[in-house]
Amino acid sequence: MSAVCSVDGCDNPVKRPTTGLCYSHYMRNWRYGSPTAVIERKRMDLTGKRFGNLVCVSRVDGRSWVVRCDCGVIKTVLTGDLNAGTTKSCGNGKIHRKHLRYDVCEYSAAHARVRRDRGNAKQYECTDCDGVAEEWSYDYGDDDELVSNERGSVGMPYSLDANHYVPRCVPCHRRYDADRHPEVVAVTCSVGGCERASRQRGWCSMHYKRWVRNGDPEKRVLMASTGTCKVDGCTRPDGSRGYCGRHYQQWRKAQPTGLLPA
């Protein structure tokens, strides 16, 4: 049976045989000169000290403090969290979260700020047609307006002030911008009844792809479903161009070589 510590009431095994003490009492003897020394732990007084948005009010125990937040909330926080800097507020992000903003930003970032500050434009009616709005439209009323150098919106003026934007639907937004800057605003698709912006050959992206596939921008071809993949021996349900998902991907990759999926 291993020897136990020579200090009365201590049943820990002896760490240093030459002293007859356990590790705890050996270290206490080494530090303070006596294995039974009782040393009061020095605790720092944090009363009135600030940690971010928190100010310490009173100590609860050796591990925590009562703190008051700048917003008026009073709560108890661990001392270690205060000293480590992991707790700096009451936790109410809506009050204390600050969004870092640069003084100047580009076109898309400016519109993102408007959506963040004023919400989604779909919550409002269009200023021009009283329909449902879809986008925030710059009103061209800011004396300090900027001009975009961003790809996709080069030459378009915009503002950093969210109050210079009004809600509009997509067609009204396009017409409003085209009336003021026709040289930089894409005209609408030439297909009758389509209000999308022109991308290629005077058509929007959708009608241009129809022209590439079918030879006619207004021709829409629907593939008849046969129920299963048209590759012999495959029983998977068909999808695009009569192939299942696996064989359709093989067909796409094999197009340049002229090979068909097996």
Image (cartoon, rainbow, N blue to C red):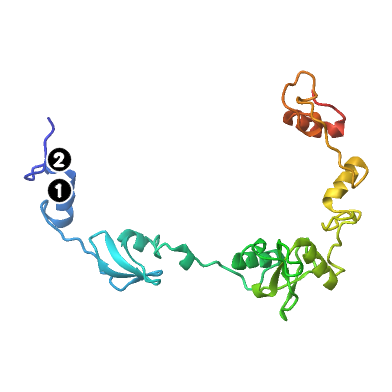
Give the residue displayed 92% in from the left and 45% down from the top: 216
Question: What quarter of the picture does the N terminus occupy?
Answer: top left
Q: Which residue is mark 2?
A: 12
Q: Kindly indicate whether the residue at mark 2 contacts the one at mark 1 (C-beta within 8 angstroms).
A: yes
- Measuring from the top left, give residue 135's x and y in whole percent: 71, 63
Toward which corner of the image does residue 118 lie, by quadrant?
bottom right
Q: Secondary structure at mark 1?
A: helix
Mark 1–mark 2 distance (CA, rounded to whole Å): 10 Å
Toward which corner of the image does residue 245 lie, by quadrant?
top right
Q: Amino acid at mark 1?
A: His
Give the residue displayed 18% in from the left and 55% down from the top: 31
Mark 1 or mark 2: name the one nearer the start of the chain. 2
Q: Residue furthest left?
A: 8
Asked if one can make out residue 172 in the rendered structure from this viewpoint, the answer is yes
In this picture, is 93 found above or below 34? below
**Marking on residue 25:** 1
Q: Amino acid at mark 2?
A: Asn
Most foreground residue, 199 or 218: 218
Q: Secondary structure at mark 2?
A: loop
Give the residue displayed 51% in from the left and 67% down from the top: 98
Asked if one can make out residue 44 in the rendered structure from this viewpoint, the answer is no
Q: Residue furthest bottom?
A: 143
